[in-house]
Image (cartoon, rainbow, N blue to C red):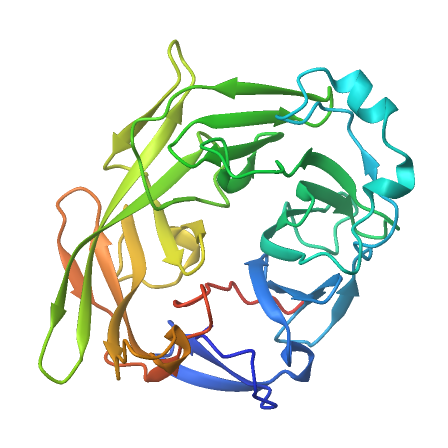
C-alpha cells in the first residue's frame, strides 16, 4: 500500500501495488478517510482515528470495531518503569483514572494482530503515546488491558518498537535493550543487550527467534534540482538469550523473505507461499525512495517522494530493482514509505 496524506484531502482512493501482476490497483476505501493506518496484519489494515482503532479488510471492506480508549481499562499489574514497587502504584490509582482522557494527545504508533481477526484467540496489540505505552485486547472485548504505562519524561529507556513472538511481547528500547513481557504469568524481564543499534524495526510473523532490521543512511545524493536519492544500508539481527543476551548479525533467514516498509513496519513471509519463483529466499524487499521537490523552507508536507521497490540478497548483498518508478506521493508525517499487506478474502 502506497502512502497517502491525512490532512486536507477528502479523497478515499488508495493505491496498492500487486507484486504478482506488477500493477497498481486503485481501491475505493472511504473507511480510511481521515484515518491513520497504524499497521497491517493477516490481510487487514489497522486504522486509528480519534479515540478509536478499527480493523478493515481492504479486499472485502469488512470492518471490526475495537474498544474505545476512553473506556476504563484493566491492567496486568506489572509495575511501570518509573514505579519500582507495583503494589503502591496500583493501590493509588482509581480504575477510572487509568482511562485515556479525550483531551490527551493520544496516538497509536503501531498495531499488530497475532492471527486472523476471525480467529477466536486473536489478540490486538498497540504501542501508543499519551499515558499508555503497550496494551492489548481480544476481538469482542469491551476494554483494553494495559501492559505498560508511558513514562512521564523521555529517557534512554523509551521504547522504539515491539513484536509478539512465542507467547512473549518483545519491546526494544532506543539503544537495543529488550524487555520481554510474559502475559500469562504477568511479569517482565529487562535484558541489557544494547550495542548502539539505531533506527531499528522488529519483524512480525517470525515463529522462532525475534528478528530486527536496522537501517543506516549512508548518504544523500543531492543534485542542483533539489532531487535527493536516499541510499540506505540494511542489517538484520537475531535476538539470542542463550547466555548473555545480545543481538547477533545474521545473513541467513532460511526460506523466508523479509519485507521492510515505513514507520517501523516489517514482516516475514515464506518464499514458498509468495508464488514469485524468480525471487528466491533469504532476501529483503524494501521501498527505495527518491525525494522530489525538496523545499527546506517549508515543512515536510511540501516534500514529494518517488517510490521504487528493490530486492536484496542477505548472503551476498546483491540488489535488483523489482519495479520502476511507482509514482510520486506527498509526505504523510512520519509515514514516508510503503506498508506491506498480504491480501485476504476472509
> What is the x, y in percent for residue 72?
88, 46
Residue 167 placement: quadrant: top right
Front residue (pair 278, 297): 297
Q: Residue at position x 70%, y 42% from top?
A: 135
Residue 153 placement: quadrant: top right
Taking 57 as reference, is 15 above or below it?
Answer: below
In the displayed structure image, the side of residue 311 where residue 204 appears, left or right: right
Taking 182 as reference, is 74 above or below it?
Answer: below
In the displayed structure image, the side of residue 56 where residue 234 appears, left or right: left
Q: The C terminus lies in which quarter of the figure?
A: bottom right
> What is the x, y in percent for residue 312?
21, 55
In the displayed structure image, the side of residue 124 where residue 94 appears, left or right: right
Front residue (pair 115, 32): 32
**Residue farthest along the top direction in this orientation:** 243
> What is the x, y in percent for residue 65?
80, 63
Q: Residue at position x 32%, y 41% from top?
A: 198
Front residue (pair 150, 308): 150
Amino acid at each position: 500500500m502506497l502512502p497517502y496524506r491525512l490532512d486536507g484531502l477528502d479523497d478515499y482512493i488508495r493505491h496498492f501495488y500487486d507484486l504478482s501482476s506488477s500493477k497498481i490497483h486503485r481501491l475505493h476505501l472511504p473507511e480510511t478517510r481521515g484515518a491513520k493506518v497504524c499497521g497491517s496484519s493477516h490481510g487487514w489494515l489497522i486504522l486509528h482515528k480519534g479515540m478509536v482503532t478499527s480493523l478493515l479488510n481492504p479486499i472485502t471492506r469488512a470492518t471490526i470495531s475495537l474498544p474505545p480508549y476512553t473506556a476504563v481499562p484493566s491492567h496486568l499489574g506489572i509495575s511501570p518503569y518509573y514505579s519500582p514497587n507495583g503494589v503502591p502504584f496500583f493501590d493509588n490509582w482509581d480504575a477510572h483514572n487509568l482511562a485515556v482522557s479525550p483531551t490527551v494527545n493520544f496516538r497509536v504508533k503501531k498495531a499488530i494482530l497475532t492471527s486472523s481477526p476471525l480467529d477466536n484467540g486473536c489478540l490486538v496489540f498497540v504501542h501508543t503515546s499519551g499515558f499508555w505505552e503497550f496494551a492489548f485486547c481480544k476481538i469482542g472485548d469491551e476494554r483494553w488491558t494495559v501492559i505498560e504505562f508511558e513514562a512521564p519524561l523521555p529517557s534512554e529507556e523509551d521504547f522504539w518498537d515491539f513484536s509478539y513472538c512465542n507467547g512473549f511481547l518483545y519491546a526494544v528500547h532506543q539503544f537495543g535493550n529488550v524487555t520481554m513481557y510474559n502475559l500469562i504469568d504477568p511479569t517482565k524481564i529487562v535484558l541489557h543487550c544494547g550495542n548502539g543499534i539505531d533506527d531499528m524495526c522488529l519483524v512480525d510473523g517470525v515463529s522462532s527467534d525475534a528478528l530486527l532490521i536496522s537501517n543506516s543512511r549512508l548518504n544523500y545524493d543531492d543534485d542542483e534540482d533539489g532531487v535527493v536519492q536516499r541510499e540506505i544500508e540494511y542489517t538484520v539481527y537475531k535476538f539470542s538469550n542463550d547466555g548473555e543476551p545480545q543481538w547477533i548479525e545474521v545473513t541467513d533467514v532460511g526460506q523466508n523473505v523479509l519485507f521492510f516498509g515505513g514507520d517501523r513496519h516489517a514482516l516475514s513471509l515464506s518464499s514458498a507461499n509468495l508464488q514469485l519463483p524468480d525471487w528466491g529466499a533469504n532476501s529483503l524487499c524494501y521501498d527505495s525512495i527518491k525525494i522530489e521537490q525538496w523545499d527546506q523552507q517549508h515543512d515536510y508536507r511540501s516534500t514529494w517522494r518517488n517510490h521504487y521497490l528493490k530486492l536484496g540478497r542477505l548472503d551476498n548483498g546483491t540488489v535488483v530493482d523489482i519495479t520502476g518508478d511507482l509514482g510520486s506521493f506527498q509526505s504523510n508525517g512520519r509515514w514516508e514509505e510503503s506498508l506491506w499487506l498480504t491480501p485476504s478474502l476472509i
